[in-house]
Image: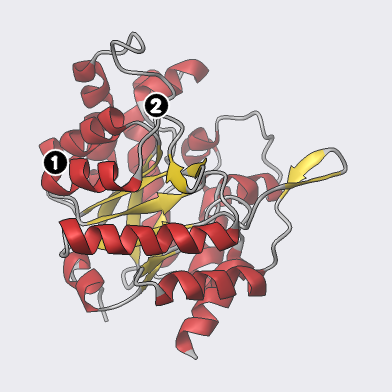
Amino acid sequence: MSRADLRQRIKDGTLIIDGGMGTQLIAQGVDPGKCGDYLNIESPDIVKTVNQAYSRAGSQATITNTFGANRLTLARHGLAEQARQISKAGAEIARDAVGEDNYVLGDIGPCGDFLEPLGTLKADQLKDAFAEQAEGLAKGGADAIIIETMTALDEIAVAVEAVKSVCDLPVFTSLAFDIAGDDFRTMMGVDVEAAVNKLAPLGIDAIGFNCGTVSLEKYIRLAEKYVKTVKDIAPDLKVLAEPNAGLPEMVNNEPTYTVGPEEFADAVMAIHAAGVTILGGCCGTTPDHIAAIAKKLKS
């Protein structure tokens, strides 16, 4: 049976997305300093192995290996001119890995620079870069675009505009939050209300959080705040959550995520109980973490 329209799918129930990509590539033997996005061209079988592992674990939507596949980020590796090709290949690999029944989410991450006047990057330059990436993802077969780990509202707004200028795919948006007193804010000072107020009118399909420096307990609080805010401002929006596997601890002088699959899945179930319906993982999560979520949801 082929997959249903994704916009309808997220209206009808819970969607399980996958987990961390970078650490899984390293586990496959990839040098941590290597441009991970270029593996889509150079070593597609490694990427496919990770995509397949998450799909087999129970993810219903696989995120492409294209987090930094915009020309501004790729320029740091001398690969700017291959942005569209790398993005298209990432979507094709994911589609080949998961087949026709599961969804492919084309991943767009931050460019690593700041827009004027804080930085030197012009809005048109950034929009062109994200549009080029989104076009490649759409041509590669993505069912939606997920814009994630963002911290600045101007950048994520430009990214949404760029995606909508080249395709009509659903758009998921996600920001990375830190603790700010009794509240949550991104590195650039954005709180949940500001994010929803700014992004909901842009025609996005889902909004939420991933990554950041938040404990599992506080991710649950963040989820509750997101759901309440969305209900008050834009009740048709769906809320997504991709928490890290807790906070990293130093193990052998290296930051390591030590939260296991069962503990992680328990926290995700609490996030789901708060009203979040698009669920996955970020840093430190593995196929085993996603499998634990899938098992608890089924039960």
* Residue nearest the viewer, comparing 198 with 12: 198
Disc 1 residue crowd, few under 14, some 14–19, many 20+, Cα 10 Å: many
What is the basis of the colouring in this image? secondary structure
Task: Tell me: 70 left or right of 244.
Answer: left
Q: Mark 2: which amino acid?
A: Cys
- 51 to the left or right of 234: right
As helix, strand or loop, the secondary structure at mark 2 comes to loop
Q: Residue at 28% across / 35% down in the picture?
A: 156
**Mark toward the start of the polypeptide (1 vs 2):** 2
As drawn, the label of residue 111 is 2
Vertical comparison of 264 with 23: above or below: below
Q: CA distance from mark 1 to mark 2?
A: 18 Å
* Label of residue 298 in the image: none
Find residue 160 and report its horizontal and vertical position in percent: 21, 39
Determine if residue 201 is in view: yes
Closer to the camera, 221 or 17? 221
Residue 203 as seen in the image, left or right of residue 185:
left
Contact, CB < 8 Å: mark 1 with mark 2? no
Query: Which residue is label 1 attached to?
Result: 164
The quarter holding residue 128 reads top left
In terms of depth relative to the viewer, which is nearer, 175 or 23? 175
Q: Indicate the quadrant containing the N terminus: top left, top right, bottom left or bottom right.
A: bottom left
Q: Residue at x 25, y 76 (%)?
A: 2
Name the residue furthest right. 252
Please state the horizontal and vertical placement of residue 5, each as a whole percent of the image. 18, 69
Q: Secondary structure at mark 1?
A: helix
**Residue 28 position within the rendered picture, expressed as x and y whole percent measured from the top left:** 68, 50
Q: Residue 93: x, y in percent? A: 42, 52
Q: Is residue 4 visible?
A: no
Q: Residues within 10 Å of mark 2 (few under 14, many from 20)?
A: many
The type of residue carrying mark 1 is Lys
